Amino acid sequence: MNTRPFSWMICVGAFLAFMVSCPLRFAAQSQSPLTDLRGQVIDENGQPVPRVEVDLRFGSGSSQTIYTDTVGRFQLRTASISQVHLSLSKPGFFRIEDRVLDLAPGVTEITLTLNHETEVKEQLEVQSEPVQIDPDTTSHQESLVQHEIVNVPVPSSHDLQQSLRTIPQVLADASGRLHVAGGRQGQTEVLLDGFEINDPASGNFTSKVDVDAVRTVTIETGNWYPRLSTSGPLRKGKAWFSDALSIQRNFVLVSELPIGQNIDTIWSGDNLLRGQMNLTSRNVLQGSFLFNGSTDPRRGLGVFSPLSTTSNFKSRRYFVSLKDQIWVGRTLIDVGAAVDTGGTDSNPQGTLPFVVTPSSASGNYFQSYSQHSRRLQLVGNLTTGALELYGTHTVSAGWNADGVDFTQTASRSGIDYQRSDTSLSDRATFSNRDGSSGPAAFRMANTQFGGYVQDLWRPWKPIVFSVGVRTDWDRLIHENVFQPRIAMNWVPAGDGRMKFTLAWGKHYQPLYLTVFGLASDQQRTDQFYNPPPTPCMPPAACPTPTTAGPPVVSSFSAPLHRV
């Protein structure tokens, strides 16, 4: 077991400092007589646009297609030419067609602005052409751009989670939770502006985001609702903001239940406020605030679950983030922090015993609980410019630190399971680990650190290698998890319409506190009973039941030394 979990942080810090100086050193050593075109693509807010298809046509009639990297840069080195025709395209953006650029001998640097598509309210519909296969991307990606998110018909079309169902490999289970590529929700990391927004305690994707606040979504492997969305410059060319608010009212009608007890009305709302300020031409500050809230006074209402067996459920979620992006030479550095906090409360309609029969339930639900979770995130990333050494290299590195806290208070009464003749089959009771009754309360906390280094190497045009390593340390298990990864792309045809990818890697599954919290929660005791000698005949009372053996105790344990 590693007793020095922070030693790798020193190595990562030294590597980051080395990478900042590398582009400047390589640039100083590179003296080429060839024409060197260096460009960057940004959007109308000054943000780099990655994975833009750049089509270059030369006077000789030849052409070449390249793609911008993760920070929006592209580079072309070729024999001395005086003129080139540029065309740029990416889904969700207006195209730039046949822009003529005159080149001088040596290095030419340009900046191109690619504007986001604007939704047009008349007969005109703006569509982007599909891009070619990106040879630099070794993972499988599926994306939705804004006009697809807004226009594709889905239930509750204001909620982004509903639009995600239209992406291949994204499926919803019976409860509406999304699963990517057949994995559990906790196995998919959900990011908003680079920050994780999975539930801090369970890892589930519970956040709601209004579709009007989203420009692009990328997956890598009865109601009414008013919506309000506004955006604009606070100071032209310097500061922008956007705000998207939605309120939703859903209702569930169970026609089999009595009138007045057959409707469940659910209220929910969300608001995403985002802002950006260009402190200088090479320093951009971004911030966001996300709020989710919902209330369901009759949660669980159904044909076999009448009003008395439902619970009054309330939830709220607050997410605040701040990120600073700085250019140092041709290296992009971003650092940020985020706070994610929220809670849920669920209480039954009364204190009557909860009874379950083969055909229905009666009484009041057996459980009430209150859960609160919080996560503090710190992140940092670095991406270099193109480095020339046996081909071209784009090196990226980063780190993250998370502090997670989870508390729960739960109180549970008994459950009586009855046969069809109303005789008692099983009685379940709940108690604390020390044998006492009453509410169970516990608190759990965890600290996680992670870092990664990755090199995207292009030794020659048809081949791209991606080699990297990530390490994670978790305070619950007190051990570093080392995760090497390697991938290769081969683009056999010159038109870029075919790509073969080979990849191998190890991936760490984060530990979520709700799983370990089960070991601190109450234990369950089931006492089973024999059926009566003769079936009970309601409304006559059943005879006193006899036990069918010793009680069965169920509890959870979390042996961390085996994780």
Image: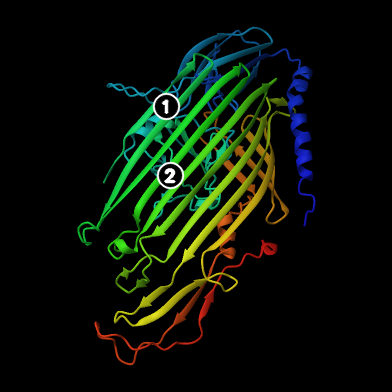
Q: Amino acid at mark 1?
A: Glu
Residue drawn where x is 74% and y is 32% of the image: 16
Q: Quadrant of the N terminus?
A: bottom right
**Residue 110 or 538: which is nearer the viewer?**
538
Label 2 to label 1: alpha-carbon separation: 19 Å
Q: Earlier in the sequence, mark 2 or mark 1?
A: 1
**Residue 280 or 367: which is nearer the viewer?**
367
Please provide percent x and percent y for residue 450.
Answer: 68, 44
Query: How is the model colour-coded?
Result: rainbow
Asked if the residue at tag 1 contacts the one at tag 2, i.e. Cβ–Cβ closer than 8 Å, the answer is no
Q: Is residue 426 above or below residue 60?
A: below
Q: Which mark is residue 168?
A: 2
**Is any part of residue 526 visible from this angle?**
yes
Please provide percent x and percent y for residue 444.
Answer: 61, 55
Q: Amino acid at mark 2?
A: Pro
Residue drawn where x is 63% and y is 48% of the image: 504
Say few, some or many: other residues with alpha carbon within 10 Å of mark 1 (under 14 / 14 to 19 / 20 or more): few
Badge 2 element? loop
**Residue 452 or 224: which is nearer the viewer?**
224
The residue singled out by tag 1 in the image is: 129
* Quadrant in the rendering for residue 278: top right
**Residue 506 or 102: which is nearer the viewer?**
506
Please provide percent x and percent y for residue 410.
Answer: 50, 61
